[in-house]
Amino acid sequence: MADTVLSIENLRTHFYTRDGVVPAVDGVSLSVRGGETLAIVGESGCGKSVTALSVMRLVPAPGRVLAGSRVYFAGLDLLALSEREMRTVRGNKAAMIFQEPLTSLNPVFTIGRQIGESLRLHKGLGKKAAREKSVELLARVGMPQPERIVDEYPHALSGGMRQRAMIAMALSCGPRLLIADEPTTALDVTVQAQILEVIRELRDGSGMAVMLITHNLGLVAEMAGRVAVMYAGKIVEQGEVSAVFDSPGHPYTEGLLNSLPRLTGRTERLPAIPGVVPHPACLPAGCLFEPRCAKAAERCRVERPELLLRPDGRQISCWPQN
Ligand SMILES: Nc1ncnc2c1ncn2[C@@H]1O[C@H](COP(=O)(O)OP(=O)(O)O)[C@@H](O)[C@H]1O
Ligand SMILES: [Mg+2]
């Protein structure tokens, strides 16, 4: 079995807002091995992006990673690094791609300069070699006319092209870890397939570890080996994708799977999970999912279940009668 590349232990990231403390991520533990894809799924607001930002040490104010949280990456204790040391990790050994590429592209530099900069900084390439490599990377992510695009500024590109430029930049240094937060949501199906293929190639060829955050359970089935299901800042279920999808152990996972469109040849109304994710500042006393759970019993209202490891390797936080 390949080495663990990323290991998160008891991650707690809270936002200290005027209206109170928001425990956006509250006790998350997970790990990703080289060559593996771990998917993180869950409805909007469950803490997926904040988990990713915490790993990269990019949590915006008023958020803070609490003492006692641990993030180990390739032998480094990331939360203990100085900001300067962290900059040598970010964009080099660990890269992240977001849904909105404009936040990570600099409007005043050409695409080629931005991809080339990290190659020159982290890999010591000269100007000419960096430019050639940039063109090659752009071609690899399916950018049309890469020799021309390399000299364009981000505003001259369409949304899909910007997304591809950002992905080329993220992959430029051959990272050991790629965190992809809804990476292809805004792209059309063909481009999406192209990008997933590039990610898959790097993962299988160089043993890159991938943490894939997505709403798309079809994509999870296609790309990921393991899946962690998040609800209200916590992992409620974690295990092998095939096992979890075959027989979900948590009613929330079951609800997510039931709301997937099925190929029945006709349009069906999908049974969405009733209710909404609780606001992190006013959580229920017992199980966090209890107010929305069709199987909730009295115990669920008063006592919060812990995430327990079962003999088959699955982790589930749900009282046994369910
Ligand atoms: N800048 C912020 N200020 C206050 N609260 C925030 C901020 N960013 C995120 N949060 C809180 O963290 C929760 C988790 O957010 P996020 O990780 O972005 O969810 P998602 O699972 O959709 O990626 C949100 O519900 C929100 O309450
Ligand atoms: Mg998000």
Image: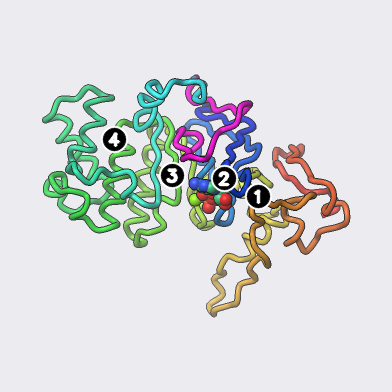
| Residue at the spot 77% in from the left edge and 48% down from the top edge | 318
Query: Mark 3 is on which residue type?
Result: Ala
The N terminus sits in image quarter? top right
Lower position in the chain sequence, tag 3 or tag 2: 2
Query: Mark 4 is on which residue type?
Result: Ser
Residue bearing the label numbered 2:
17
| Residue at the spot 58% in from the left edge and 56% down from the top edge | 43
Q: Considering only vertical position in the picture, is 53 above or below 197?
A: above
Residue bearing the label numbered 4:
172
Q: Is residue 2 left or right of residue 164?
A: right
The C terminus sits in image quarter? bottom right
Residue 208's x, y, as percent?
42, 33
Which secondary structure, mark 3?
strand
Residue bearing the label numbered 3:
180
Q: Residue furthest front?
A: 18
Residue 9's x, y, as percent?
62, 30
Q: Is residue 29 found inside the magenta-colored segment of the image?
A: no
| Residue at the spot 68% in from the left edge and 59% down from the top edge | 254
Which secondary structure, mark 1?
loop
Magenta region: 53-75
Q: Considering only vertical position in the picture, is 305 above or below 219?
A: above
Residue 216's x, y, as percent?
50, 57
Lower position in the chain sequence, tag 1 or tag 2: 2
